[in-house]
Image (tube, rainbow, N blue to C red):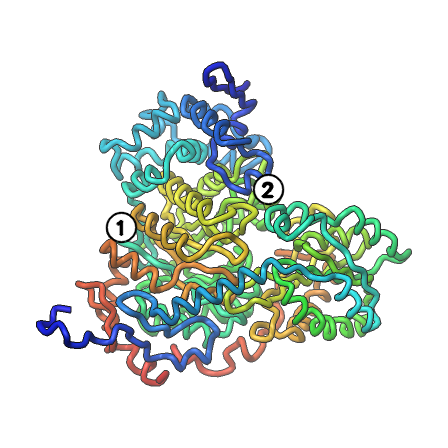
Amino acid sequence: MGYKYAVGHEVHRFDTLAVLMAKATPRRSGDELAGVAAADPEERAAAQLALADLPLKTFLDEPLVPYESDEVTRLILDSHDRDAFAPIAHLTVGDFRDLLLTDDVDGAVLAALAPGLTPEMAAAVSKISRNQDLVLVAQKAEVVTRFRNTIGLKGRFSTRLQPNHPTDDPNGIAAVILDGLMYGSGDAVIGINPVSDSIPAVMTLLKMLDDVIQTYAIPTQGCILSHVTTSLECIERGAPVDLTFQSIGGTEGTNRSFGVTLSILQEAMEATRSLKRGTVGDNVMYFETGQGSALSAGAHHGVDQQTLEARAYGVARAFSPLLVNTVVGFIGPEYLYDGRQILRAGLEDHFCGKLLGLPMGCDICYTNHADADQNDMDTLLTMLAVAGVTYIMGIPGSDDVMLNYQTTSFHDALYARRVLGRQPAPEFAAWLEKTGLFDGETLTRRASPSGPFQAVLEAAR
Amino acid sequence: MSGSDPKSALPAAVVPDRWEALRELTPARIALGHTGVSLPTKHHLAFQMAHARAAKAVHEALDPDAFAALLAARGWPAIALSSAVADRTEYLTRPDRGRRLSDASRTALSAVVSAEAPQLAFVVVDGLSRAAIESHALPFLDAAMPMAAEAGWTVGPIAVVRNGRVAVGDEVGEVLAATITVVLIGERPGLSSPDSLGVYLTHGAKVGTTDEARNCISNVRGAGLPPADAAAKLFWLLKESFGRGFSGVALKDDAPVSQAIDGGGQNFLTGR
């Protein structure tokens, strides 16, 4: 069965739903690499017009990736909530965009719709939305998660403190943690990308993070972003694991290339929860995603990268994560060529994640082989902050000296908080004030902090 | 700003951080200070320069013949190859071609296959940092090759590939029928680390192998993991991989932690 759209005498034909979705996608290098992109802007516009006429329920009847051979498709369709879908079951993709933009649809309506939406529906409506639509709709959503603090409340803007070090040296990592805390970073998580997946090294870092959080009674959580099976082994050996991390993708084959299955993720969630280390909630999973991973793994099934990215959120939401973020510009120019494509993808990912009910953050980033710079990141940061992004990364001076890419700095987060009047998670904001680091009223950093950090700062002089 | 005398000097804008001494502990850009909530001019412009230099370095490809000659001079058989990529611009947008050898290179490699398949194949690939190969590949091999010899492992001709991705090693390993393929590749250059080398170990590599089948040692460079230490780490992984008959996420790195990483002493932040 095919789809078509006529412009005057010219008829544009799209053989399958996957072809229609791919050709309706705003331009990006990864879809061109996969050979699924529209040939030119006119074909893209025709595909978007045809997609707008498509009934949303089509996505329940025509899986883009086969149900029989893909456990992600089975998860999405088997867990689809028909009752939640009922209010929009009669709509086309275009009608759905129109509805989302009305004032009748607020955060509560979005939350009620979320279980009735499949990732493919979210992806479809994003494809026919402008950047400002992606901002306007996403900022209505409120997705709240909890572990040792409360993340995602309206008016809040959180950060992951990312204290990576090229050799995992605990003192070098601690120096960056201190720098970040002084700049008010770290309420989403203090999360380290370890150089190696070595179990003893990861155990050492887990212990150190736990020591820091306990010593200064910081209302936040720690995470070592090692492979899920390494985290499981560390839990087995008695390590203090707050959150279990994993990179995930939108097809079974992509996840296999990451060395995971849905059952491994389930096992990890249960094992981490069994430690009962959360004080205000038990959202224990931390997922990272990014457009292009499925093509990179040779597991894209001819589906465009943005739709597959949304399907990764379908995986994430089955495990009630504390945090999810798209690492939007990390994968490189083969998938998102320049600042313009990274901007678009970052807004789409955040929109789709929020629509599907996820605590969506974004690693606003680029590599040195992409045609992008700090100004591009400022644009994406500002638009995402307006869109209510749950959290961003925090790195000293934007330079990750371990992963070799540029992401948002501690200063960048303060900029977003300042221009939009946003605060960190409430428990963390109270801690920043109590420890004398920040003045809560004015969001100002105090030049000479009193309190528990005085001794260590004196010693560092 | 609200002072009544317009000629009175404004206060200094930049507020320095008091913990600059901690920069000894990390190459990260800590203790930058701030003006308002923003980055002081000095650090903002230093970043611009670092980015300009890193972006420029990406576009320099390796001369595989010259590098193969250096290897041959050490008595190690080597062969210069090229991926299926035409030029550097195509390298950035066509990873599929960067993962395959050119037809000519595949033919050339097939011509040097020996009757007895090697246990170990090293593949040197420029990736995104020619500087990483030029600075660290030889020191790494100087440490790794004697270890391989001592362990009695047979080593195939070292392939040097221009404009290649990690997975180009799979084709080399497949053609040579090597048991384990070790790829040395220039990692994406960071602002502070333009010459970082990555080392990937794959057991039974063949075209189409995916990343979960690999073990990786990253950040191999003077200021990261020194090449000799990385070679020792590789040696540990090789022994495990030969012993167990596989590589990848199922092969956990359980080697003892070095004193440096174990902290050895007290952590300044926690006192523990």
Q: Is residue A25 above or below residue A166?
A: above
* Residue type marked 1: Leu
In the image, taking residue A78 as reference, residue B109 lies left or right, namely right
**Closest to the observer, B120 or B93:** B93
Residue A289: image location, x then y, percent: 48, 48
Residue A290: image location, x then y, percent: 49, 47
Chain of the residue under label 2: A
In the image, taking residue A1 as reference, residue B125 lies left or right, namely right
Element assignment for label 2: helix
Q: Which residue is mark 2?
A: A253
Callout 2: few (<14), some (14-19), or many (20+) C-alpha neighbours within 10 Å?
A: many
Element assignment for label 1: loop
Residue B105: image location, x then y, percent: 79, 51
Sooner in the amino-acid sequence: mark 2 or mark 1: 1
Q: Which residue is mark 1?
A: A153
Q: Is residue A63 above or below residue A308?
A: above
Q: Which part of the image, by quadrant, shows the N terminus of chain A?
A: top right
Q: Quadrant of residue B11?
A: bottom left
Q: Quadrant of residue B153?
A: bottom right
Q: Which part of the image, by quadrant, shows the C terminus of chain A?
A: bottom left
Q: Quadrant of residue A413?
A: bottom left
